[in-house]
Amino acid sequence: MTISWRYVIVVLVCLSSSALAARGECDSTSVGDGEWIKHTIGEQDAVMYVATADMDQDGDLDVIATSNTQRPDYLSEIAWYRNNDYGRSWDKFVIWNTSCLPIEGATGVAAADIDRDGRVEVVVAASRPDSSGGEVHLLSPFRRPTGWWYKVVLQASSSEGYWKVYTHDVNDDGFEDVIAGGTDSAKILINPRFFPQLIPWRVESLPEGTGTSIFLADIGGDGAVDVLNSNYYAQRISWTTLQNDDGDLEFNDHIIAEDIVAAFDINTLDIDADGHNDVIVSALMQPGIQAFFAPQEVGGSWTTGWIRDDYSATDIYAADVNLDGVTDVAAVSFGNSGLGVPGSIAWFEKVETGDADEGEWITHYIDNETIRLPADFELRDVDADGDLDVVTGSLADDDVLWYENPR
């Protein structure tokens, strides 16, 4: 096999030291309904997206964050924060900085052992702010995550930016592939298995209008992972089956709804307890978290409702926040400074079964006092006490944060 030396040189010069950038105890503040405790993990300029993984394999859940400096060049720092003492203190390690072949306009991030060497790699999506395209990057550690890292570009486009990103073994070969939400369509990047940092990845495009925000779940009810799509630009939401025929991939896209203005984040839960995963969607800077109820048979019509029609959410998530056995919905909101509406983090409790109208969901605020421009978030058990905490950041205050569940 012939390998391009130009490609190898790109791999070798893209080195970044993950030297300790900061160490310290969390600052903590009680906020929200039920007195959630807000902890500052560490500093990072204009936090965009977060992910969680046990980066150093010590049994604690660590945090990875992407930043966007919000200057004209929009150069991005990628860092991970080592969890010490169940979230009470953290060490910051910079994976990639702005000085060596920088990532411009970093967005989504995911972490997984891509090459099955026992070490966690980091996948970062990017969308340049001038609409001149974007990339999907793979960041790999040399020996240990607290040392040197190197970067390769898995996918580059001169016209398409990339946002949410996940890893999943699409072709059932035992290796994690990458699924990225693009502005034109979602992309599947197939792991070459051997030397994935050296060998180019095969790129498969899902149908046009899939992406930009994506989520992975079984929507068809057949036990297989599907791709949920919310495309802000196409104003449509859909779900796509991933069929693997001995390495040949086939995609079948099912439209859930069209003409969804400013369709943004997407997630899923069984709202009406009928055994089918329903879909929830936020709309950027628009009021309401909309619900779409799955038909009993694939190909049927989806019906609509609301989780809340008065909460302007950006990112949304579904999980059992209060451990009562019923899946809840959590969301973050930029608010509206012009109208005096503060940014917030909230969760919504389903108090009875049936259609998801406003009266059946109770709003609980995690923070509607101190958070400004909350970033993407995850619900994870940071302090290993058995309940779900919130991991997020503040674009305005340049902090990576976690909120301790008071339950």
Image (tube, rainbow, N blue to C red):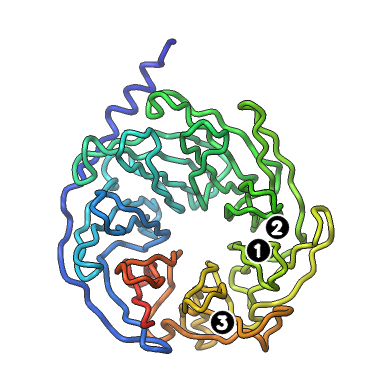
What residue is disc 1 on? 263
What residue is disc 2 on? 237
Q: Between residues 227 and 57, which one lies in front from this camera angle? A: 57
Is residue 29 rendered to the left or right of residue 175? left
> Do the residues bearing badges 2 and 1 touch, measured as CB atoms within 8 Å?
yes
Q: CA distance from mark 3 to mark 2?
A: 24 Å
Q: Where in the figure is residue 319, as x and y percent of width and height?
A: 52, 69
Is residue 134 rendered to the left or right of residue 15? right
Examine the rendered structure and indicate whether residue 102 appears above or below residue 265.
above
Q: Where in the figure is residue 210, as x and y percent of width and height?
A: 67, 49
Question: Which callout, 3 or 1, points at the residue further toward the start of the chain?
Answer: 1
Q: Between residues 102 and 11, which one lies in front from this camera angle? A: 11
Q: CA distance from mark 3 to mark 1?
A: 23 Å
**How many numbered markers are drawn?**
3
**Residue 316 shows in the view:** no
Image quadrant holding the C terminus, namely bottom left
Q: Label for residue 349?
A: 3
Amino acid type shown at disc 1:
Ala
**Residue 154 shows in the view:** yes
Amino acid type shown at disc 3:
Glu
Circle 3 residues within 10 Å: few <14, some 14–19, many ≥20: many
Examine the rendered structure and indicate whether residue 74 appears above or below residue 123.
below
Q: Nearer the viewer, mark 3 or mark 2?
A: 3
Examine the rendered structure and indicate whether residue 42 appears above or below residue 17.
below
Q: Helix, strand, or loop for circle 1?
A: strand
Question: Which callout, 3 or 2, points at the residue further toward the start of the chain?
Answer: 2
Q: Helix, strand, or loop for circle 3?
A: strand
The residue depicted at 81 percent of the width and 56 percent of the height is: 297
The residue depicted at 40 percent of the width and 77 percent of the height is: 372
